[in-house]
Amino acid sequence: MALSPSLFAAKFGITERDLESYLSEALSAGGDYADLYFEYLSTSSIGMDEGIVKSASESVSLGVGVRVIAGERTGYAYSDDLSPEKIRKAARVAALIARGPASIVKTGFREASKHNLYPMLTSPHEIGLAEKVDLVKRADAAARAYDVRVFQVLANYADSIREILVASSDGRLSFDRQPMARMGVAALAREDNGVPQQGYSGGGGRVTLDFFLNEKTPEYFAREAARQSIVQLSAVDAPAGESVVVLGPGWPGILLHEAVGHGLEADFNRKGVSAFTGRIGQQVASPLCTVIDDGTIAGYGGGSRRGSLNVDDEGVPTQKNVLIENGILRGYLQDTLSARLLQSSSTGSGRRESYQHIPMPRMTNTYMLAGQSDPEEIIRSVQKGIYCTTFGGGQVDITSGNFVFQATESYLIEDGKITRPVKGATLIGNGPEALKYVSMVGNDLQLDEGIGICGKEGQSVPVGVGIPTVKIDKMTVGGTAA
Amino acid sequence: MSQLLDIAVNAARRAMELGATGAECTLSEGEEFSASVRMRDVENLKQAGSRAAGIRVLVGNLTGSSRTSDLTPQGIEKMIRGALDLARITTPDPHAGLPDPSELGRIDEAVLHLYDDSVLHMETEWKIAQAMKAEEAALSADPRIGNSEGASFDSYIGSRAFANSLGFAGEYRSTSCGLSVVPVAKQNGSMERDYWHTAAREASRLESPEEVGRRAAERALRRLNPRKVPTQKVPVIFEPRTARMLLGDLFDAVNGGAIYRHASFLAGKLGEKIASDALTVIDDATLPGLFGSSPFDDEGVRSRRTVVIERGVLKSYLLNTYTARKLGLKTTGNASRGLAGNAGVGPGNFYVEAGARSEADLIAGMRQGLYVTELIGASANTVTGDYSSGAAGLWIENGQLAYPVSEITIAGNLKQMLMNLEQVGANLEFRSSMASPSLVIAEMTISGQ
């Protein structure tokens, strides 16, 4: 019995027959497709501030979302009560979207194939609380020990385990158990009684606490946060205007997420509202650029990258999708609905924040393949420009294609050398144009540390990004210095 | 007493039986509805209800929190025990605790008018029709509007109950409904979108769908064929939508949590002149029918009006019980949290008091400058005040809105921007819990070509 390993069968006694009957209810007024998404989410978090463990909290939530698709229409309802009456009621509400005779639900499920990217032996909740507290205490101590000028430290640790079960009217059945853990450290530093400056670092992935003992320790993140706060103490005003921009490897890959990733989500393209609509096969970046969205990256601390998933939130196995190949736009990120309407297939990109949300096409881990250039050679090639190594967030207007991302650690490049640190500044560009100015791509691809959260239409999902050192010949830098 | 409040009161009592020295329990229940239409057809219909509970316990100076969606007696018992277990792993914090009992209380719900039956009685067909009409008004406004990201009508009916071990027990219901539309305008290879949105606690206070559609279309159209202006320093007018975002950055800087950590450029500035005379900022959770109003805050402290900045002088931070104790001050009734966890600080209705001049007048008075209609990826460093944001808007030449601009950034420092605030418009409208009329800043750096 395919269902038996699932928590929903074990704890709530849900059988395949139940699933079929709920799906029949959902299609009782017609419709092309229906699915059920059961979710159990358990989270815990611990926070330290001013050297005191001030907060410790945990949360449990549970529910099921029922979706009915009829053409381009979607009906959705959910319940946080898994009793058969409540699930049936949700199914009847979702069914209101369709108006016709009942559609047939295929009987007999086949379990979808899936990856095994995070074969966790221990659930985050089998780990002692004392060990979690120890992590934040170590981070606090390490940040303070880094430099006497560090005077405030916030450190937190959070983990979760999500169990999902997806059953669809076309007979697909998937379940998955998805761990997630993350640490974050923020430090404030100041000279005597001068103006404070802040630094932030964090990371994690679909890993468990062991990751922070063996791979990336609390000290690693703490020192990085403290280092950034100290660097900022000597920062000068960022330049204003167009400039050569060199992005360091790793998290600066947020450029790709904003500049091209969102604009390639299939929902925007099927509606014709993206700046990339109708551009498949066209040159949208320099030939040095190949951009991938890959939900299957494993081999990371016994688990996987933050954006990786065995199956997406529609039960479809994730895959490695080529978005841009040598500068040519190759494909969109598809969920089930867009794939149906565009006569394409899902790229394993259907994601949702929780059972309370309708899935849509989303990114997983988005990165650019490494090129040939030595990163030092890239810096040496720049007469005047800025080198950005750390970013805050970013945002895009997918219709005009304009996007921004916020540099939080940057340096001036003068005569081929990295000189003074500059203050935070927003960088702005236009998606289909910006990557055409990429003139050098480093051989040093790095993925980020695992802190990304992507927001779209009010739904947040964890994502990853990555990039090698990249030189962009022209981009607008939003500083204040002439 | 409702079932929700009953659970809250009993959970707080039960936590004390199990060894807590203080407890506060929050429950919420809500029904959400949303209908979206796109290109004259229904796209999504969503409807559902949910309930959840959260508790925070104190054991001496230790605190723990837990949240659950399982409201059965067993689920609540597990939540309480979970919070107590967690409290035992924290370290003592001398400032942790419940509010001073004298601060607890509430404003009369009937006066606040946060709930209106009209939202309960709205028919699904009517709600869909509102979205349809709004989109139609946008689509038919101009031939250059041939596409749309759709229109949606949302409504929410909720209840929130709160009880603590000091004997406070209170609950309130609230409603909201809103209509928005996002048309896409296209001309000569330029494609731009914009939106308009109306929201209220009762259906009769919404702007008409025709008005919402018309304004959204007008906004999208005026963005077409934008230019990228040269890098320069000019005066900037923030329209209410973008001024409100700037006000959000100011809120972060008067938030007691940032103050006691020395993580705000306004720390230690109480009583000092931090802005021009033109600026008066109020936080008031007692204004009837508005989104930032509530009878009591998320710690059971009575809602009130606080003058934050008066004619440029910083009069008060915004505080909950904890941040107030850290600073040796009194809470301002701004405790905010989901259901569990230590309370943070949130706004009531946080707004800039209106000035005398109309926005048209402010524009007419400017020889050259930028009228900002969109901020994208705004980044304000609360610690230092450094500010840099992507922007789009209209260029002002000789007192006229001359042409659209985009793919530029605006930058400055909030400290100087507050001092350089030249004018405040008369156009104050409350569309969410933060509201500002148009603001004129004497000079900011524009990065463009």
Image (spheres, coloured by chain):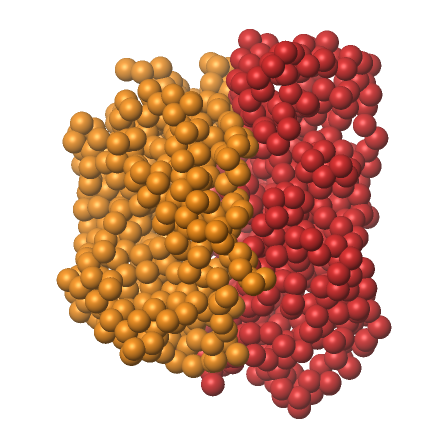
Along the line of sight, the residue nearer the viewer: B387 or A107: A107
Residue B344 vs B70, above or below: the answer is below
Q: Residue at x 74, y 27 (%)?
A: A175
Q: Quadrant of the N terminus of chain A?
A: top right
Q: Residue at x 79, y 18 (%)?
A: A109
| In the image, farthest residue toward the bottom | A415
x and y, in percent, of residue A421 in the image: 56, 79
- B436 vs B39, left or right, is left
- B140 vs B334, left or right, is right
Q: Colour of chain B?
A: orange
Along the line of sight, the residue nearer the viewer: B4 or A361: A361
Along the line of sight, the residue nearer the viewer: A347 or A252: A347
- A29 vs B204, left or right, is right
x and y, in percent, of residue B130 in the image: 39, 32
Q: Colour of chain A?
A: red
Along the line of sight, the residue nearer the viewer: A73 or B381: A73
Q: Is residue A273 visible?
A: yes
x and y, in percent, of residue A170 in the image: 76, 21
Residue B3 vs A304, above or below: the answer is above
Residue A80 vs B352, above or below: the answer is above
Q: Residue at x 39, y 80 (%)?
A: B233
